[in-house]
Image: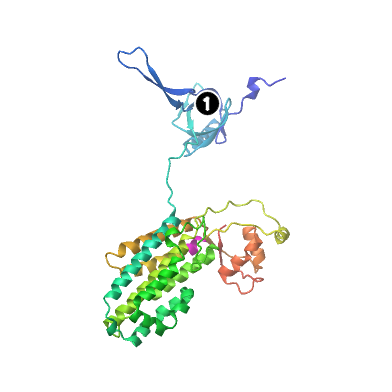
Amino acid sequence: MADTWREQLLPASFRGETFLIEDTSVPVGRKVQLHEYPKRDKAYAEQMGKVARVHKVRAFIIGADCFERRDKLLKALETEGEGTLVHPWLGQLSVVPGQCEMSHSRREGGMVTFDLTFYPGNAPLNPSVKANTARLVAQTSASYWSGALDRYKAAMAKVDAARINLVGLQNRLSGVFLVIGSQFSPLTGAVGSINAMAQSLKNSPGSLSSLFSGYFSDLRLSSLTSGSSGKSTSAGAAAFNNYSSAVATVSSQAEGAASINSVGSSSGADTTAAAQALANLVQDALLVQATATVAQMPVVTPPAADETTASLEQQTIAPVERAEVPVANDVIAARDALDDAFWQASLKADATYYPVINAARQQVIRHLSAVAASGVQLVTVTPLQTLPALVLAYRRFGDATREGEVIQRNKITHPGFVPALPLQVARE
């Protein structure tokens, strides 16, 4: 025999706090705006969508513990956000509590009455626009490099080559030559020695700028896309492999750019001006290359934690597959170093070039901030006893394959003996 309608009713509650319901009401149907016009017999009914289902509930709490249960229900009603209403006739509903009324009566001792109002939950969010910061970084690279070339040509046009002291120029360019060798290794063969570079700067300054322009033509600065959608086809800029290597590359590039910010003044004004012009060009080239590296770093959402953890033996056979997530602390450190290098370079810019380099700086910092926000934080963990890195990684993350992460970050001498000292590990 089928259950009666009374037996089919659900026990009423909101956010787990139970109460009894006397009666309920809710508007249904569609909203209609009636338009009536003077001297016309017919009206126009404009349909305006469904009526919002605002639930009116007459409820009460009764019993010796009515005051205790009342306070719990009040807390549930006054908590911000959506909650689950179990409606005796309509089932579970996601609602937002509105203005309600509570009443007590001496005649009805041991009972508290509520007139509740619940509005529909799951309201759609307002449309919003999310900037593709990686693409914006890539697009600013081309204009940045174009501005750098214009500044270099303008600076060299003011230099009297006959007044350049070749020996003094070589001394001023020693740091620049080292940066080219370490950061632009494909160009070392074309540049040759420091003496050859100084000769080129004195006799044919345009050849050096053309050398870097040819290097960056392979980067396709104007057509770089975000790191999540593709990889650069350039041989000069390393394709994105992982966040650790990308952050290390950006940090190295920022350090190199800061090291050649100034060449010193000696051996004559023209010698110093020529050396500084080339130093500025190489510094800008290094920052452009850093910009291209940053543009390839995708903004990701950290993966949800997996509640099921395979045993250590199972992970030996089938290692855990985990999407890489950037470490926010490392990205922020690289961002700050790059920001400082950009700032030092911008202090030497004139009124024409400053907006160009500052625009690149702002886009790079904005994107790295977004990458850091999508990463995980570092926390300090102190093991209770000396453990192998494998065991520590398994206990901390449920993933034994992350032992290398613990070893590298904390510079562990022997992976079998992680000391019982404060260690820096990822939060997740």
Q: Residue at x 30, y 84 (%)?
A: 164
The quadrant of the rendering that contains the N terminus is top right
Figure colour scheme: rainbow
Please name the amino acid that badge 1 sits on.
Ala
Depicted 76 relative to depicted 375: above or below: above
| Most foreground residue, 67 or 415 | 415
Q: Residue at x 35, y 87 (%)?
A: 167
The quadrant of the rendering that contains the C terminus is bottom right
Is any part of residue 262 visible from this angle?
A: no
Q: Position of residue 290 (x, y in %)?
A: 44, 66
Q: Residue at x 55, y 25 (%)?
A: 21
Q: Residues within 10 Å of mark 1 (few under 14, many from 20)?
A: some
Q: Position of residue 34 (x, y in %)?
A: 38, 19
Left/right placement of residue 345 relative to residue 76 reads left
**Number of disc labels:** 1
What secondary structure characterizes most of the magenta part? helix
Residue that label 1 marks = 59
Span colored in magenta:
327-333
Left/right placement of residue 10 relative to residue 352 reads right
